[in-house]
Image (cartoon, rainbow, N blue to C red):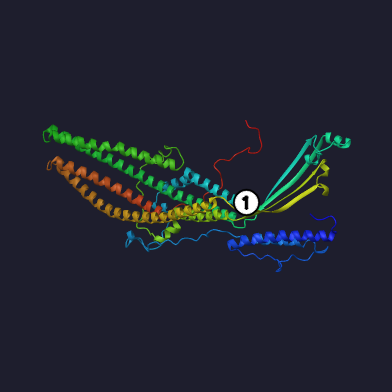
Amino acid sequence: MIAATTTPRQRRTIRSRRLWRLSLVFALLAGNAATLTGCIMNVPLRPSSEPPAAPDHNTGKTPLRIALLILTATLLAGCAVGPDYRAALLPTPSHWSAAAGTQPSGPPDLSRWWTRLRDPLLNELIDEAVAGNLDVATATAKIREARASYRQAVGALFPTLQNSDSVMRSKGVSARGPASVPTGGGLSPATASSFDTPRTVFQAGFDASWELDLFGANQRAVEAASYGADAAEENLRATLVTLIGDVASNYVQARGFQARIALARRTASSQDEITQLTKNRFAAGSASAVDVANATGQAASTRAAIPTLETAYGEAVHRLSVLTGRPPAALNARLARIMPIPAPKLPVPTGIPADILLTRPDVRQAERQYAQSTAKIGQAEAARYPSVSLTGNIATAGTRLGDLGRNSSISWSFGPTLSVPVFNAGKLEAAVDIAEAQRDQFFVAYRASVLAALKDVEDTLLSLDGERARVRTLATSATAYRQATNLSRSLYKAGSSSFLEVLTTERSLYSADDALIQSRVLIATGYIALNKALGGGWDGYIDASTPQIVDTNVGPHLVR
């Protein structure tokens, strides 16, 4: 308390000394915090430990200016704690072992790779699937969520400002509040009259606050949200890679089932002719009942495979329809016409294994999630350090609306708030340990995604090379069996061969032709799988900003 006998000049001196001490304490706290984090602070304090001389009338605001300088220096000294993300350098082989000497050199051509299957209907279906697939719609919604989270994190870096207005009609309480009511003795007639008179109090004001983020908790949150948005975008690309591959694979399988159904029907018709011929020869006495039974059984066995193939074809068409976002039977008419199995031009360039770190969206997504988890360690670490906030408010009140805004009715307050975590039983340290353990998990997941991607390419190359060799052998086998079947039929019709030879060659030819069709399907699906493994997907525009549901009448309204 300042004694009443002091002069105004002495009172100003005492106040300035107190302001100086408060400023010095605040500067020491900020300096200690900066020392803990390794940040550099330049606070313009005098070298002497003694307070400055008492200011005169022209320099009475010096301590306040110093306090403002300290606050500015503290704000500029803000930094971030926790580890800074550095991209991990993962080792990869120098070349694909399965492709040694068989694949052309050069980077893979992944741009709209499905068009090299030369099937216009397939191109249309992929375009329709990208536009209507529900998994793609879910992935775009996740992007909007991640981007909104990023904007929310950025908002924490800025001050907040709130307005509050009120009007209150009261009786029994003075305009200055309950504290103005006497606590002892009686009320004078004037006071009692004022106390019993109803009053109206108008109030208006603004409250502001700003967390200075000295140790980068909010900055780390923004960093983590940014990485999260990147991961959401890579998730969309990974979804598109899977979608396009699934559409192409199911389309090729549907065409393969169509070809196998047509083969079974042709073979069954040919076997029916042999059966009828055998029955005629049996009636003439030149064939046995065993020959007739074998011919009839073989034709029936071939026809029995047709319903199974038709079921598989229908399921493939249903999967295609759902992938495009339509009901299961929506594509039945468009795919009813039999078309050849798409045949890619092989081999294709595969590049080097290190390319998948850039071309595989699932690998890039895992890397972004690893980066996000690293930033979250800084968030958890910052919670262990002091936090400083600036808060203030300005308000005006009066018994009449016209009194608002007058100097006599305005009140304000402003100042910093320092919060130091003193004791929390190890919870904050445990939170850092949790974040570090989660970072390790995401790093391992990133490494696992790279290994899985390498394995996918190696397996696909190995399978594709083996199937190309197999299809050549099957083509030779089918040609030979076709010649044998034609000869055995001619000899059987001429009576120079037994039915057993015809039966054997017919069965072998059907098996060879059916295996050849399946091998061609496997080559086409292997080509598709190789492009998926290399990261080939959609490189066109995807609208991720338009929501699936557009709400209307979202303002204030009565609930029905």
Instruction: Tell me: 44 left or right of 105.
Output: right
x, y (%) of residue 281? 14, 35
Q: Decide if residue 64 is in sight here.
A: no
x, y (%) of residue 542? 52, 49
Instruction: Give the image quarter of residue 356.
Output: bottom left
Direction bottom: furthest residue: 47
- Tell me which residue sits at (43%, 38%) in the image: 330
- Specify the amino acid type for callout 1: Gly
Q: Quadrant of the N terminus?
A: bottom right
Q: Residue 436 or 306: which is nearer the viewer?
A: 436
Q: Residue 218 or 335: which is nearer the viewer?
A: 218
Q: Considering only vertical position in the picture, is 46 above or below 241?
A: below
Q: Say which residue label 1 marks.
A: 155
Q: Decide if residue 507 is in sight here.
A: yes
Q: Residue 493 or 159: which is nearer the viewer?
A: 159
- Tell me which residue sits at (30%, 54%) in the image: 468
Instruction: Tell me: 307 left or right of 220.
Output: left
Q: For mark 1, give the secondary structure.
A: helix
Q: Residues within 10 Å of mark 1 (few under 14, many from 20)?
A: few
Q: Considering only vertical position in the picture, is 266 above or below 19?
A: above
Instruction: Tell me: 269 left or right of 176.
Output: left
